[in-house]
Image (tube, helix red, strand yellow):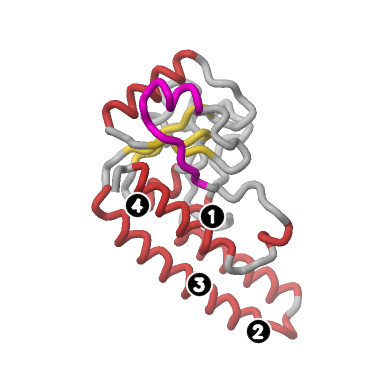
Amino acid sequence: SRGITTLDSPAEEGHAEEAHSSHSHSNHGEVNPHIWLDPLRAVSQVENIRDGLVKADPSCAASYRRNAATYIAKLQTLNAEISNQLNPYQGKTFVAFHDFAPYFANRYKLKADFLVDVPELNPSPADLMRVAADVKRSQLKALLSEPQEGGRSFNALAKDLGVKISVFDPMETGSVQASQNPATYFKVMRSNVADLIKAFGG
């Protein structure tokens, strides 16, 4: 993350309003780590990886630079594509299971709320009330769970609110095979955007 502008983890109370607060209590630490969900911050990560490889193995520098340039171009194309798709929804709020989405939301001028700060926590009654208010205010059609959750944490709440459960994969878990496939990031991000648009009612 060297040279990348980061966002602070929120305080326990007032999640959405304090997404940029300097207070923190979470297992994430003071900085929210989910940089890669912003394709342009991911570009900076690729540049850092490229530079590290060039320094460690200068004999292959040309190859590292060429491969990085190809991947960066794909990330820039992806960002333009997502920007175009989400432009009609600027300012809208979506609700994820845990606090993985601030970089994504920040990039595309959305607002991200969440049920719990980190996946290991259980939601409090106040968390449930806050999310319910967000859903009603934003007229959200779906809550965004994660693949490993399978909707478990949102089932009762979604039923009470009359909304569906969709999926947004923050790519924190997954198979070794998927992690080794250069196409995985692009496939997952496009799927995430499609499911988010459905959650907005699009």
**Residue type, numbered disc 4:** Tyr
Residue 61 in the magenta stretch? The answer is no
Q: Are marks 2 and 3 in contact (CB under 8 Å)?
A: no
| Tag nearer the camera, 2 or 4 | 4
Query: Which disc number belongs to residue 108?
Result: 4
The residues bearing labels 2 and 4 have C-alpha atoms spaced at a distance of 32 Å
Q: Are marks 1 and 2 in contact (CB under 8 Å)?
A: no
**Coordinates of residue 39 in the picture (x, y in percent):** 47, 60
Which of the 4 image quarters holds residue 95?
Answer: top left
**Residue type, numbered disc 3:** Ile
The first of marks 1 and 4 along the sequence is: 1
**Coordinates of residue 18 in the picture (x, y in percent):** 40, 30
Q: Is residue 95 above or below residue 76?
A: above
Q: Which residues are magenta?
A: 155-168
Q: Report which residue position mark 3 lands on.
A: 72
Camera-nearest residue between 51 and 15: 15
Q: Report which residue position mark 1 lands on.
A: 36
Query: Which disc number belongs to residue 63?
Result: 2
**Which residue is situated farthest in the top direction here?**
125
Residue in the image at 55% along x and 47% along y: 170
The residues bearing labels 1 and 3 have C-alpha atoms spaced at a distance of 13 Å
